[in-house]
Image (cartoon, grey):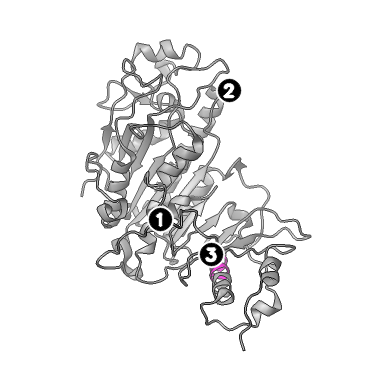
Amino acid sequence: MTNALNRRQFIQLGTGSVVVVGLGACDRRTSSRAVSEAVPTSTDVVGSTATAPTFDATSPPPTASAAPLPVGAAFGGRRLVVVQLNGGNDLLNTLPPADGRYHDLRPTLAIPDADIVALAGVDDAGLHPSLAGLARFWDAGRLAVIRGIGFEVPNRSHFVSMDRWWRADQLTRPGWLGRVLDELAEEPPPLFATALGSGAPLLNGRLVQPTVITSPGSFQWVDIQPAWLTAMGDGGDDLAGIARHAFQRTVQAVTDFAEITGRATTSDDLPTREGGATIAEGLSVAAQLLAADAGTQLVVVSASGFDTHANQLPEHAALLADVAAGIDAFFDSIEATGLADDVLLVVTSEFGRRAAENGSGGCDHGAGGLSLAFGNGVRGGVFGEVDLADLLDGDVRPTVAPQALLTRCLDWLGVDAGHILGARDDSLDLLLA
């Protein structure tokens, strides 16, 4: 006889143990989420959670698509990697403009003209010197630079702006890639959608949740399931059945990850900063996941530190060097495994910085930002505009809507962007086909 999961037993999962199970929408596709934060026990192990999505449950569900996506052939084998630079990456110092106003606005922070990395065929901007290693992608026509990307009516709050990006500016709906996961005809493998770093609400669906790995070296499982849960059968749609199913998917995710990466034990020497692993570390793991036979097709890699209010010059240089090293090594890896034609990598951040420097050696929250897109399927070039003579309340004016980038990401996956986003935005000619 199957016992019901009572309140005391449910609370037991979250107190004094390393496993917490949160139950989402009542569908067995609700996936596990594993986090690598230390817990107050005698053993340094990882906790695993299957959390409910953070959308407004009172909102109406989107209309169902005509043909659910079969997991085995989802996206035609194409993969999408999203790199999130959390904190608001500075557009103007990442892509310094050839405009005297830039130096006037930033007398101490402007990148010297002699240090700017030239982009062949572009006479009004270049790359920060820390991104010199990415010039090879530009020269090969595999890099698209999208400047001035942002919402027409911007918001300088991290939380609001990040939420707008994650939910495609529809704050009562789940993440824009989470909506794609909800369209799958069957439950995907545990590592099908994986977040590496500080989390990825854009992957949160109503029915399906991603696997979240905040520190690859600590992503592991210790079997301490309570006896009352272990003894239960696998069936049932009650609370206990859903909890057990979440446990099973967590164990499978950790097992698959350990086999792919060889990370069976914790490691205290991983390169980290606030928000988890560095971009380079996350992309290294992403390349391993994509090349393995684990069904991984959506990966989000994120790291914080881009909120450069002070001491920007050295800190931003180090952050961009991490990004460049990670992207460079990532594409070396996927080219070696024959996946180069199947992967699109995009870089995003919630907003840019103010055009003028502040009094603390940094720049405050702004509006128009920068996105990058890499891959053999990318139409290389510069998209969008930066006009320092036409600022929006002291900010770079947004000239490209984020929905335009999201539309092309969904087109890459072969997904109906109009259905997922509510409307297409075809203003960004980003893909070759």
Callout 1 crowding tier (Cα within 10 Å): few <14, some 14–19, many ≥20? few
Instruction: List x then y, in percent, for residue 93.
Output: 43, 24
Callout 2 crowding tier (Cα within 10 Å): few <14, some 14–19, many ≥20? few
Of the residues tagged 1 and 2, which is closer to the observer? 1
- Whether the residues at callouts 1 and 3 have beta carbons within 8 Å, the answer is no
Q: Residue at x 37, y 44 (%)?
A: 169
Tag 1 secondary structure: loop
Q: Residue at x 70, y 70 (%)?
A: 8
Q: Is residue 251 magenta?
A: yes
Identify the amino acid type marked 3.
Ser
Which segment did they paint magenta? 249-259
- Whether the residues at callouts 3 and 2 have beta carbons within 8 Å, the answer is no
Res. 159 in view:
yes
Of the residues tagged 3 and 2, which is closer to the observer? 3
Measured along the vertical axis of the image, is residue 107 above or below residue 57?
A: above
Q: Of helix, strand and loop, which mostly describes the magenta segment?
A: helix
When asked about the image quadrant of residue 383, the answer is top left
Instruction: List x then y, in percent, for residue 376.
Output: 29, 47
Measured along the vertical axis of the image, is residue 387 above or below residue 349?
A: above
Identify the amino acid type marked 1.
Ser
Nearer the N terminus, badge 1 or badge 2?
A: 1
Nearer the N terminus, badge 3 or badge 2?
A: 3
Q: Residue at x 46, y 29 (%)?
A: 130
Identify the amino acid type marked 2.
Asn
Distance of label 1 from label 3 (alpha carbons): 24 Å
Q: Is residue 126 magenta?
A: no
Q: Which residue is mark 1?
A: 59
Q: Which residue is mark 3?
A: 32
Callout 3 crowding tier (Cα within 10 Å): few <14, some 14–19, many ≥20? many
Farthest residue, direction bottom: 1
Q: Which residue is mark 2?
A: 311
- Please name whichever residue, 22 or 127, is drawn nearer the observer in this view of the structure: 22
